[in-house]
Image: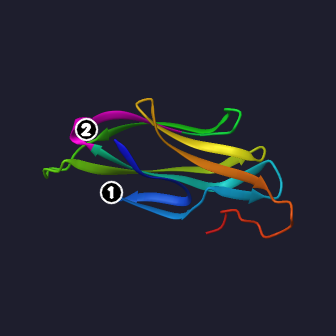
Amino acid sequence: MKVLIAAISDHAWVENGCLTLCRAFDSIKVKKFPYAIPRMSFALRILINRLEEGEHKLNLSLTDSDGKKLMNSDINIKFQFPAESVPETSFSFALNGQNVVFQKPGDYVANILVDGRLEASVPLYVREEKDGGPLEIPDKI
């Protein structure tokens, strides 16, 4: 199993097996806390081989530096190969969250586990805007 894409974005979706994501990011600046980001998506594309076909458990969590989970999602998935004879195939996932609340600035991480194994980690740096400059928050599309 190999993670081809793991990203945090404004919006992500899967259509006909194709993954689409808009405005991937790894940091946001906020004027005051607590801050609720209106929408945040996790985009994931996994490449598997024939031996990994079948039922699996996918877990995605967004955690702060103290280990507190802001988001946690368990999904049962079934990897099924197309009828054609191919040695590997990929699967796409989009997990969407709304109004995720950040209580404080800090370093956050999105962890992706498959069957309890850590397959990918994506950092998210949440900072307080102190200089009065433009806000760089992904809350408008």
x, y percent for residue 89: 26, 50
Queried whether the magenta region covers residue 52, the answer comes back as yes
Taking depth in this image into account, of 114 and 1 the one nearest to the observer is 1
Q: Work out whether 115 lies above or below 44.
A: above
Are the residues at dot 1 and dot 2 in contact (C-beta closer than 8 Å)?
no
**Quadrant where the image shows the N terminus:** top left
Image coordinates for residue 91, horizontal then vertical, percent = 34, 50
Residues in magenta, as a range: 49-60
Dominant secondary structure of the residues highlighted in magenta in the image: strand
* Label 1 or label 2, whichever comes before in sequence order: 1
| Residue 68 image position (x, y, % from top left) | 68, 33
Residue 55 is one of the magenta-drawn residues: yes
Q: Residue 56 at x, y = what percent?
A: 35, 34
Q: Secondary structure at mark 2?
A: loop
Three-letter residue code for mark 1: Gly
Residue topped by disc 1: 17
- Depth-wise, is mark 1 or mark 2 nearer the camera? 2
Badge 1 element: loop
Is 123 left or right of 33, judged from the image as shown?
Answer: left
Around disc 1, counting alpha carbons within 10 Å, would you say few (fewer than 14), some (14 to 19), or many (20 or more)? Answer: few
Q: Residue at x 77, y 43 (%)?
A: 103
Q: Quadrant of residue 109?
A: top right
- On screen, residue 15 versus residue 54, left or right, reads right
**Residue designated by label 2:** 53
Q: Using residue 140 as the reference point, say whether residue 48 is left or right of it.
A: left
Q: Residue at position x 56%, y 58% from top?
A: 9
